[in-house]
Image: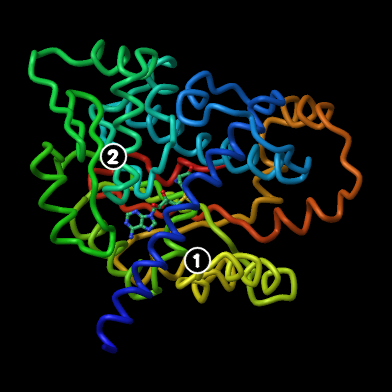
């Protein structure tokens, strides 16, 4: 009976984590509808603009999307695209299509998420030509694999897997021509926080051991031990969503330590207030005109509770330490 209950509880927990994928996409869809940044593809995953979101939420998503893509694009340029990218817990992310439009596609762009999310993403791709056409265009042979659980083309691959099951993940990635010797960028955006510190450390160690030349970009909560952080945790718990990895979100140092203790040579981290100040200020000035913001202090608090941490190891000495803000 106890085993049955444990199984049911963890099932519910995973289901709550999966719903965060819709939250992220719905917020990104709303912010793009207001003009914070351009994403012509997100409408094919989230049809409606949805309920209004507060300006500080939109600015927070702006900093997140611009901050992560700044590092991602810098990595791709540094490698002259001769590399691979693995987006861990990608959800309905549309980066593949942006990179194709901007001529910045890596040799292969991989995404991993729970099979249930992957099945939804693939269904949308199959049924919406603006999504499927760019994949077909970047594929040279006839055989493009696309079934309910995975998609594999020359340049884009989507895999259904659990990031806590590394042998399973590795087997699937290798079956789809992952090349460990190629410089590799791993990206996780609001994903590791849903895993225990041991599970995310195991994932970070696996990545460090697998790829000799690599970078890991992680976006998620930080400074969670204070009162504001406590309220964020309680809000998520009310929706059955447990931040199993919140311990690692105590500070910028604890974020960096996850990588420095698992085989990465170097790690840097900034809170999102610092990232917001480091973004091109002409564009920041543009988005600050979009909506009137009543409480600048609330925006600051929100931005101080998220961070980007990036870690590198550079066996091939390709200048990864220069990929920064
Ligand atoms: C908050 S969403 C973020 C989605 C996307 N990275 C973004 O920023 O738009 C978290 C995603 O991580 C995925 N995820 C969390 N834990 C996972 C695990 N153990 N295995 C696979 N995917 C996981 C969820 O299914 C969800 O799609």
The residue closer to the viewer here, 186 or 83, is 186
Q: Is residue 149 above or below residue 29?
A: below
What's the mark number on residue 255? 1
Quarter in which the N terminus is drawn: bottom left
**Residue at 34 percent of width and 75 percent of height:** 198
Decide which of tag 2 and tag 1 comes sooner along the chain. 2
**Residue at 31 percent of width and 17 percent of height:** 132
Could you say where residue 83 lies in the image, as x and y percent from the top left?
Answer: 26, 33
Q: Is residue 275 above or below residue 232?
A: above
Left or right: 49 as drawn, with respect to 260: right
Identify the image quadrant of residue 209. bottom left
* Label 1 residue SS: helix
What's the mark number on residue 215? none
Identify the image quadrant of residue 99. top left
Could you say where residue 169 lies in the image, as x and y percent from the top left?
Answer: 19, 54
**Residue at 58 percent of width and 73 percent of height:** 250
Q: Is residue 67 above or below residue 291?
A: below
Could you say where residue 104 lies in the image, as x and y percent from the top left?
Answer: 38, 21
| Residue designated by label 2 | 119
**Residue at 72 percent of width and 26 percent of height:** 34
């Amino acid at each position: 009976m106890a085993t049955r209950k444990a199984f049911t509880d963890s099932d519910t927990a995973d289901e709550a984590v999966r719903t965060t994928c819709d939250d992220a996409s719905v917020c990104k869809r709303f912010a793009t509808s207001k003009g914070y940044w351009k994403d012509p593809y997100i409408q094919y995953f989230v049809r409606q603009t949805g309920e209004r979101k507060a300006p500080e939420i939109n600015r927070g998503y702006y900093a997140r999307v611009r901050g992560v893509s700044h590092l991602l694009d810098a990595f791709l340029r540094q490698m002259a695209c001769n590399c691979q990218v693995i987006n861990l817990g990608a959800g309905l992310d549309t980066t593949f299509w942006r990179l194709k439009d901007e001529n910045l596609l890596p040799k292969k762009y991989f995404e991993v998420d729970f099979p249930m999310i992957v099945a939804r993403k693939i269904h949308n791709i199959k049924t919406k030509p603006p999504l499927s056409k760019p994949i077909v265009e970047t594929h040279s042979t006839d055989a493009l694999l696309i079934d309910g659980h995975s998609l594999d083309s020359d340049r884009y691959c989507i895999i259904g897997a659990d990031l806590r099951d590394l042998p399973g993940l590795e087997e699937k990635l290798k079956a789809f021509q992952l090349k460990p010797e190629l410089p590799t960028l791993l990206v996780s955006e609001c994903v590791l926080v849903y895993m225990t510190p041991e599970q995310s450390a195991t994932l970070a160690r696996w990545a460090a051991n697998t790829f000799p030349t690599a970078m890991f970009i992680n976006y998620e909560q930080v400074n969670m031990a204070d009162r504001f952080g406590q309220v964020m945790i309680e809000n998520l718990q009310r929706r059955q969503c447990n931040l199993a990895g919140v311990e690692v979100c105590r500070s910028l140092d604890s974020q960096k330590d996850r990588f420095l203790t698992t085989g990465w040579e170097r790690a840097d981290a900034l809170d999102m207030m610092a990232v917001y100040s480091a973004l091109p200020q002409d564009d920041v000035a543009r988005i600050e005109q979009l909506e009137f913001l009543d409480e600048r202090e609330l925006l600051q608090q929100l931005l101080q509770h998220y961070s980007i941490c990036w870690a590198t190891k550079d066996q091939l000495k390709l200048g990864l330490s220069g990929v920064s803000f």
